[in-house]
Amino acid sequence: MELGLRDKTVLITGASGGIGRALTEAFAGEGARLALLGNRKFAELEAWTAGCSWRDRALALRADVTRPEEMERAFAQARERFGRVDACVANAGVWPRDELRLDELPEERLRATLEANLFGSIWTARAFLRALAASGPRPDGHGAALIFIGSTAGRFGERGHCDYSVSKTGLYGLLRSLKNEIVTLDPYGRVNLVEPGWTATEMARPTLEQPGRVERIVRTMPLRQIARPADIARAVVFLCSPLAARHISGETLTVAGGMEGRVVWESDQVDAPAVRRRIDEA
């Protein structure tokens, strides 16, 4: 299927992480031009990008999503290189591993999680809309696309991680507001949210490797498997397409194996080794 992404410029935050790299490879496969943002792992991102076949269509940029001035500068650099930014994926985020009740949660962690996940998405979206205002809509009618990466924790909550849950729940407010704002800049502009469940990223793997954790997770999924980063990336690419998803805006696409927040399988019906093998086959 032709997705209409060839030679479109896509800016991806958190491009150095597991989902970020999968996003990069998926968009590169569609022929897109890439503005790739990293921060703490920027050196790794820059080195990886330099070794890829599509490196001539990519620009690696260092920016901290919690600093609005750095996001403005990154978009300006992307526009200087490529002329405009057609799509933006607000993917950067953190998931603190330690499980702590709210009464145990240090103020520093709470504020840091909200700064990275919620405010980072706000500053990314604001910089994207400002770039769109400066460039105007495309003359071919292919509307701009803004995608937020949420989490099922924003829908169901997550014990011991209320800071993360709150930071992702806030994206619903952004989604529902910005879908009505973007069209004042681009009549065919769209805003959507992809909501992953448990995904086998570098950040999540230590938790997934804990005894009994996989069994507990997949008991709530009709599809007894853990998502791979590529599963999330394909959903994002679809929603960014000005052809395949041209009339989809303000929606949440959940990529979580049908998770409902309730148990649908008994423990003896979960083949944990098979689940882990499918992860490693990715």
Image (cartoon, rainbow, N blue to C red):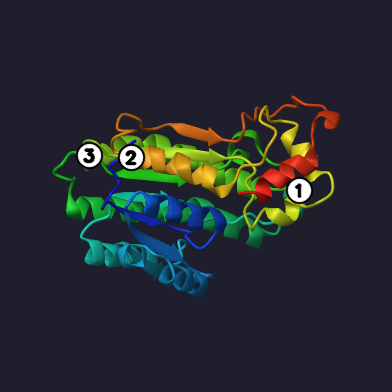
Q: Which residue is mark 3?
A: 184
Nearer to us in this view, 187 or 130? 187
The location of residue 107, given as percent across then percent down, is: 66, 59
Q: Is residue 214 left or right of residue 257?
A: right
For mark 3, give the secondary structure. Answer: helix
**Residue 136 in view in this figure:** yes
Could you give the CA–CA distance between mark 2 and mark 1, rounded to whole angstroms? 40 Å
Q: Which residue is mark 1?
A: 101
Q: Is residue 149 left or right of residue 210?
A: left
Q: Kindly check if marks 3 and 2 are in contact, taking CB atoms under 8 A apart as contact.
A: no
Residue type (three-letter) at the residue carrying disc 3:
Thr
For mark 2, give the secondary structure. Answer: loop
Q: Is residue 207 left or right of residue 249?
A: right
Q: Is residue 182 above or below residue 113?
A: above
**Residue 90 in view in this figure:** no
Residue sitting at 20 percent across and 60 percent down?
Answer: 83
